[in-house]
Image (cartoon, helix red, strand yellow):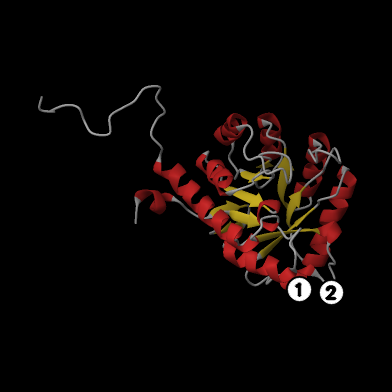
Amino acid sequence: MSDAVKKDGKLKIGKYEFSSRLMVGTGKFSTNEVMMASHEASGSEIVTVAVRRVELDKTKESMLNYIDTDKYTLLPNTAGCYTADDAIRTCMLAREALDTDFVKLEVLGDEKTLFPDNEALLESAKVLVKEGFTVLPYTSDDPIMAKKLEDIGCAAVMPLAAPIGSGLGVRNPYNIKIILEHANVPIIVDAGVGCASDAAIAMELGCDGILMNTAIAGAKDPVSMARAMKLAVEAGRLSYLSGRIPMKLYATASSPLEGIIK
């Protein structure tokens, strides 16, 4: 086993621990069966569900009946919330209905861009942390806001790579690097990943994990894309741990020039 593999541990988010660093969603799949197969192919241990868009009563027809909670940890999210009060109420509902304190906190500021309202996000995060939730906030790639969210007790911080569902990949790697440099909690890229190379790039920056939905569910072959994302996250993480060579403006010969017979 290589030194890089040996020194990599589990992903720790508050009191939770995971071997996989890929988190997946449940929306936009053509069928529940495709969703189930994609989750399996992804190797993920965390599945996020939109509390406001799913039937929480498992005695009725619900997407939740297609998620094996013995295998996957549910991460309820507050997608569709535009105020701090709505987000807080949604998290309380999730804790009551799903018996979990593990939540992905979203407070959106605009219906077109789906960018987060960071002021309302911070306000709601403060309340939820005090109420004993393990809070994973979806935020912009703003290093100042990321640090504020950590400082109030969020268990991880989830900066966007690009707008939700855009597939644009990591648009501002420099901000992500700054966030990582100052973070003492896991940094998990959320939103904007479109293909396997996007996932690998995010992980090579040093991110602790990635959450994605549209990139898998919207692919022509979601199950194959899920497997591709699994491999990309693993490869990107191993590449980061291995330590890349420095970038140089000019060439450096692969074979030493010293000792060449002329």
Residue 7 rendering spot, x and y as whole percentages: 41, 50
In the image, residue 180 sits, relative to residue 101, either above or below, namely above
Image quadrant in which the C terminus is located? top left
In the image, residue 71 sits, relative to residue 141, either above or below, namely below
Q: How many marks?
A: 2
Image quadrant in which the N terminus is located? bottom left
Name the residue rendered at 74%, 69% in the picture. Answer: 32
158 left or right of 81 in image? left
Label 2 sits on what residue type?
Glu
Neighbor class of circle 2 (other Cα within 10 Å; few <14, some 14-19, many 20+) is few
In the image, residue 20 sits, relative to residue 197, either above or below, namely below
Secondary structure beneath label 2: loop
Q: Which mark is residue 61?
A: 2
In the image, residue 239 sits, relative to residue 70, either above or below, namely above
Pick whichever, 151 or 28, lies toward us: 28
Name the residue rendered at 64%, 34% in the picture. Answer: 171
Neighbor class of circle 1 (other Cα within 10 Å; few <14, some 14-19, many 20+) is some
27 left or right of 171 in image? right
122 left or right of 234 in image? right
Secondary structure beneath label 1: helix
Residue 22: name its quadrant: bottom right
Residue at the far left: name it.
261
Residue 5 rendering spot, x and y as whole percentages: 40, 53
Q: Which mark is residue 127?
A: none
Label 1 sits on what residue type?
Asn
Residue beneath label 1, please?
Answer: 65
Name the residue rendered at 64%, 64% in the picture. Answer: 38
Mark 2 in CB contact with mark 1 (< 8 angstroms):
yes
Residue 57 rendering spot, x and y as whole percentages: 85, 71
Residue 240 rendering spot, x and y as whole percentages: 46, 42
